[in-house]
Image (cartoon, coloured by chain):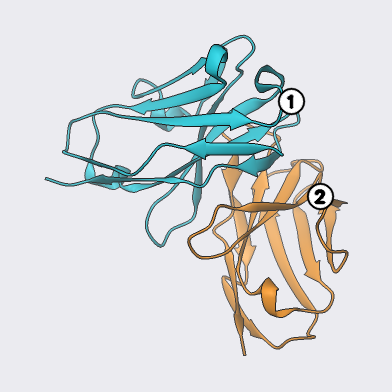
Chain colours: A orange, B cyan
Amino acid sequence: IQLTQSPSSLSASVGDRVTITCRASQGISSYLAWYQQKPGKAPNLLIYAASTLQSGVPSRFSGSGSGTDFTLTISSLQPEDFATYYCQQLNYYPLTFGGGTKVEIK
Amino acid sequence: QVQLVQSGAEVKKPGASVKVSCKASGYTFTGYYIHWVRQAPGQGLEWMGWINPNSGGTNFAQKFRGRVTMTRDTSISTAYMELSRLGSDDTAVYYCARSSTSLYSDYWGQGTLVTVSS
């Protein structure tokens, strides 16, 4: 299963609403996760089952979608949110990741 | 608290093998899968496979079958990933991560840089 993330990068300001999309090459129900990765660090699980917020993750992060189209939304971008975001599908083997979306400071 | 602590960086020659360890603490080791994910320099994430520490059962990405071995030692709560016949394109940071049977990786190791160079 191929996951296509868009955009591959974006520039935004603190306080902006940011939306990242992830499209699957075939339906994956709701078996999708979102991770945040900062330079030199391991990924951090933000959202699982497409829309469930992982414990400890700020409520400004939200996920939606099912089937082939998914979105990750950051309602009000904070300085610590500048990072790369990856989606991952867990419906089919091999588990696969999207190519990533780098969120940079405008 | 849950921790996954990986072994240190490695430098290997082409054709050699590397074995990376991942020591778990703060939870019941046999209750969660251990996944291995790698990331080449400046690139995205690539899932390699998982091991069920309880049964020893494994599931690998087809790309790595025949070249990867995943094992565990439950007595010391440690999982291992061995990759053989290394090539320059195996240069990457290798991460271990735990998941329940739902497969979502909620805790990750710090990563181990493996450099393949002649």
Disc 1 designates what residue? B101
Q: Position of residue A76 (x, y in %)?
A: 82, 79
Which residue is at the front of the view, B5 or B79? B5
Disc 2 designates what residue? A54
Query: Local crowd at mark 2 within 10 Å, few (<14), some, or many (≥20)?
Result: some
Q: Is residue A1 visible?
A: no
Which residue is at the front of the view, B97 or A35? B97
Q: Is residue B58 left or right of residue B91?
A: right
- Residue at 33% of width from left, 44% of height from top? B9
Q: Position of residue B33 (x, y in %)?
A: 64, 25
Residue type at tag 2 = Gln
Q: Position of residue B46 (x, y in %)?
A: 49, 44
Q: Is residue B114 left or right of residue B88?
A: right
- Asked if residue A10 is positioned above or below residue B35 in the image, the reply reads below
Tell me where residue A72 sits by quadrant: bottom right
Element type where label 1 sits in the image: loop
Q: Is residue A15 visible?
A: yes
